[in-house]
Amino acid sequence: TPFDVMQSMADEYSVIPFLPEDRFLCTFGHIFSGGYSAGYYSYKWAEVMSADAFAAFEEVGLDNEDAVREVGKRFRETVLAFGGGK
């Protein structure tokens, strides 16, 4: 079960042991209380955009310097040139 996995991870990595009645896996409230949710999902969205941008470089071949330069130029013109304004 997910609780067995949590327990085995806790046994190996936790400083103090979890109580048998601990249901930490069922709690996600810290994400949605206090306005943190927007910040949390903006981090996730940033990871997606970062992976997508890097994939463009991978697609042309990271060893192909001319193609990487072109992708970098396109990235600069279409993303970075706007700064934080768009």
Image (cartoon, rainbow, N blue to C red):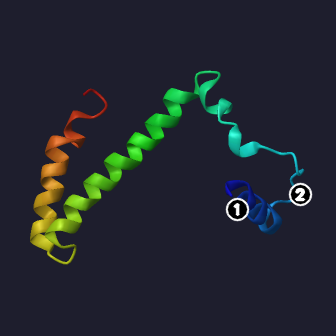
Task: Judge left or right: residue 61 versus residue 49.
Answer: left
> Residue sitting at 81 percent across and 60 percent down?
14
Q: Sequence-wise, which precedes: disc 1 or disc 2? A: 1
66 vs 50, left or right, is left
Helix, strand or loop at mark 1: helix
Query: Which mark is drawn over residue 76?
Result: none
Left or right: 85, with 10 as reference point: left
Residue 77 image point, x, y percent: 14, 44
Is the residue 66 above or below the residue 35 in the image? below
Amino acid at dot 2: Pro
On the rendered image, what quadrant is the C terminus found in? Answer: top left
**Which residue is located at x 86 percent, y 53 percent?**
18
Q: Which residue is mark 2?
A: 17
At label 1, the amino acid type is Val
Residue 11 position, x and y percent, is 82, 65
10 Å crowding of disc 1: few (<14), some (14-19), many (20+): few
**Relative image position of residue 40 (x, y in whole percent):** 52, 36
Q: Is residue 80 above or below residue 19?
A: above
Q: Position of residue 79 (x, y in %)?
A: 21, 41
On the picture, is 34 further left or further right than 15?
Answer: left
Q: Is residue 25 above or below residue 5?
A: above
State the residue position of label 1.
Answer: 5
Q: Residues within 10 Å of mark 2 (few under 14, many from 20)?
A: few
Looking at the image, which is closer to me, 58 or 71?
A: 58
Residue 63, picture quadrant: bottom left
Query: In front here: 15 or 18?
Result: 18
